Amino acid sequence: MTDSRRIVLSSDHAAIELRQAIAAHVAAQGFEVTDIGPVSPESTHYPKHGEAAARRVATGEADLGIVVCGTGQGIMMAANKVKGIRCGVCSDTFSARMIRAHNDANMLALGARVLGEGLALEIVDAFLGEAFEGGRHGTRVEMIMGIEG
């Protein structure tokens, strides 16, 4: 495990059940979990939930974030609009390890309509269990963070 123990989770309405399963899973591993919802299955907009979780990571209220929507793509795009966030959507464990090891990702996005719960939890474990390698990857992350829109 990495030293990043405070995790914030959010989702849209399409991913409430998966988000809650992830929250319980990581809490059982000793992570401090802040689940910022939503709890109602009423239709809601993933951009506001991706942004809300990303702001908590960007301000240091959380070390890492996990966000979930139908595909993971939209909520990832919203999270990445927040300065300081590096969020990747993953559908496999290799990519989840690599976004931490090589890209120092501080957020993970998942698709509830893409993944089953078992694989999603394996991806979360891969993401949370990997540390940033630094070195040449540090230079590349600095280059990424230096890009302005």
Image (spheres, grey):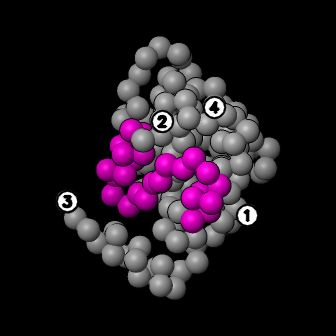
Q: Nearer the viewer, mark 2 or mark 3?
A: 2
Q: Nearer the viewer, mark 1 or mark 4?
A: 4
Q: Which residue is mark 3?
A: 149
Q: Earlier in the sequence, mark 1 or mark 4?
A: 1
Residue 119 relative to residue 141: left or right: right
| Label 2 with label 3: CB-CB less than 8 Å | no
Q: Name the quadrant of the N terminus.
A: bottom right
Residue 18's label in the rendered image is: 4
Q: Which residue is mark 1?
A: 1
Amino acid carrying label 1: it is Met
Q: Is residue 19 above or below residue 123?
A: above
Q: Position of residue 103 (x, y in %)?
A: 48, 68
Amino acid carrying label 2: it is Thr
Residue 145 relative to residue 86: left or right: left
Does dot 4 land on a helix, a strand or a loop?
helix
Q: Position of residue 14 (x, y in %)?
A: 51, 24
Residues rendered magenta in the picture: 74-98
Question: Neighbour class for label 2 at 10 Å: few (<14), some, many (≥20)?
Answer: many
Amino acid carrying label 4: it is Leu
Q: Earlier in the sequence, mark 1 or mark 2?
A: 1
Amino acid carrying label 3: it is Gly
Q: Position of residue 32 (x, y in %)?
A: 68, 48
Q: Residue at x 73, y 39 (%)?
A: 118
Q: Which residue is mark 2?
A: 71
Residue 92 relative to residue 69: left or right: right
Q: CA distance from mark 1 to mark 2?
A: 27 Å
